[in-house]
Amino acid sequence: MMDMNYNKKTFCLFAGPVIVAFLMVVVIPLLIGVYYSFTEWNGRMDQVPNFIGFSNYIAIMKDEGFRNAFLFTAKFTVVSVIAINTIGFSLALLVTKKLKISNFMRTIFFMPNLIGGLILGFIWQFIFMGVFQTIGEITGWTFFQGWLADANTGFWGLVIIMVWQMSGYLMIIYIAALQNIPKSLLEAADIDGANGWTKTRHIIFPMVAPAFTISMFLTLANSFKLFDQNLSLTNGGPGGATEMLALNIYKTAYTFTNYGAAQAKAVVFFLLVASITMVQVYVNKKKEVEM
Amino acid sequence: MKSKQNSRILLYIIGVLTSILFISPFYILIVNAFKTKRELFGSTLTLPKEWILDNFKVALNKLSFLWIGKSFSLEGFFGSALFNSMFITITSTILIIIFSSMAAWILVRTKSKVSNFVFYLFIAAMLVPFQAVMLPLVAFMGRLGLQNRLGIVFMYLGFGSSFSIFLYHGFIKSIPISLEEAARIDGCGPWKVFWKIIFPTLKPIHVTVSILNIIWIWNDFLLPQLMINKKGTQTIPLKMYLFFGGYSKQWHLAMAGLLLAVIPVIIFYFFAQKHIIEGVTAGSEK
């Protein structure tokens, strides 16, 4: 085989542009950001801010709003990951049953994914406040009244729009996995007299395990990082009760102009997102092998 | 046999009900966008008595959706939300396709420590949430005078590169190297080898990369909000945010505005549906 290694000049010509953009947009801001989290930063770059050690970090540990945002985000993530994956997988099973309306259903279920989170949140704000109110008046059920007015309905409101948006995406991933299961495997199981549950447990689940790893990664990361829907649906209200981590960081910086603390929160946020998703992928990969 | 048929009927019923549940927000959006304020206040579920278009006139204007200024002109179009969204999305996606595929190819074909390091750096960056770099980025780009439409295109290249390089990298590894060897024996330099041989063979992955980037960039709110919050440069999500703040009590106008914002996406979905589904599938197979 011929030597395919190209020289430095060629390497720079091809990889250079994207590396420059990447360094300037991701790497440098990340490094500067970590440094700024230890300073009394004012959000600008014209002078070097005072170094104050861990003060920002100590302050945010005592920040009740940040703690609540973390707990709310964690709770939201657990519930929505379970809900989205269960529903996404069920939708995939439904549309692979070869019904006449299967293609139509695929189109419908995936559609919400194309609409941005911000616009989605506004549409659902109207549904929860306006349409639910109407339904409540017609049926007389108090269940439908006053949605988004407290932490509880705000929480479920966020879960519902997240499920509406993302389960169609996961459906696509699970459909691909289900279609990759060799027909012969299922037929062989039929001949051996395996029932529906045995087939599901020993053939379908192990075969879709890699898709499950990816789906979990996507839902976990997206739920934990949720911002747009949070901003447009509840804006963290009432009284910060539905504020998630990303929105809390945003408000610390832009509403309370506390840039040093906001950046310290951002660093903690980064460490949380990175470690949680890495642990999840590691655990799922291990499970894949065992199955 | 009877029970099998019954279970099929049950599946149809579940399918139809779930579809209605998924489609109902669109129904609500459409019917309420055509109502008067008074009618909407009375009933949010029924079809409008009379389909009126006045809401759209107001929304088109306030959103600067198709033009900016008093009435339509070509010049006004270049400051409109639709133009800004299209310009930013299309330019960014083209740059991402060109530069990410170039980088991915050279990273696959160069076996060195540097090349490995660069690749893993791009992959690791997928774990960095936007909030972690947001504040220093605003300060940094502000200093460099990049808080404008071209600046944001550059930023999308930086943020979009990780995942795109990852996708290209996986695909390029499966292209037999003999193709390139033959071209090199014929005297082609790396530039020609890439553009004549590699770039065209990457067509399926170009489609995937563009679909995923188009959806993401088109819908992105926070980066434009931080970088191009100036009149005449705002994108659709950004305009929608400002519009909604001012009209949140006037749901008939808000609904018309939201419907306007959704229409381009639905048109895109209608034309590119097959590619979108394939792109999502390919993009998730890590």
Image (spheres, rainbow, N blue to C red):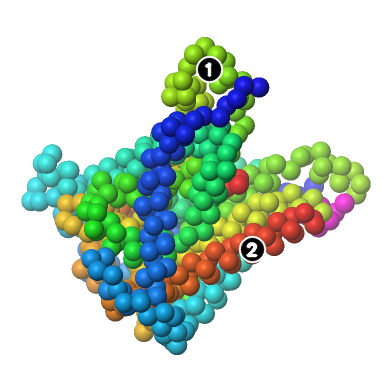
**Farthest-out residue, right:** A192
Q: List x then y, in percent, for residue B199.
A: 47, 27
For residue A250, say whether it is visible. yes
- Circle 1 sits on which residue? B184
Query: What are the residue bounds of the magenta stretch?
Result: A194-200
- Place residue A186 in its image quadrant: top right
Compared to A84, does A41 lie above or below? below
For the residue pair B135 and B113, the one nearer the viewer reads as B113
Q: Is the magenta region chiefly helix, strand or loop? A: helix
Callouts 2 and 1 on one subunit: no
Question: Residue flagged by tag 1: what amino acid is it?
Answer: Arg
User: Residue B146: within the magenta?
Assistant: no
Q: Amino acid at mark 2?
A: Gln
Closer to the eye: label 2 or 1: 1
Count residues near mark 2 (Cα–Cα under 10 Å), then give few for <14, some for 14-19, many for 20+.
some
Magenta region includes residue A196: yes
Q: Which residue is at 53% across, 54% downward?
A: B124
Which residue occupies the foreground of this view, B228 or B124? B124
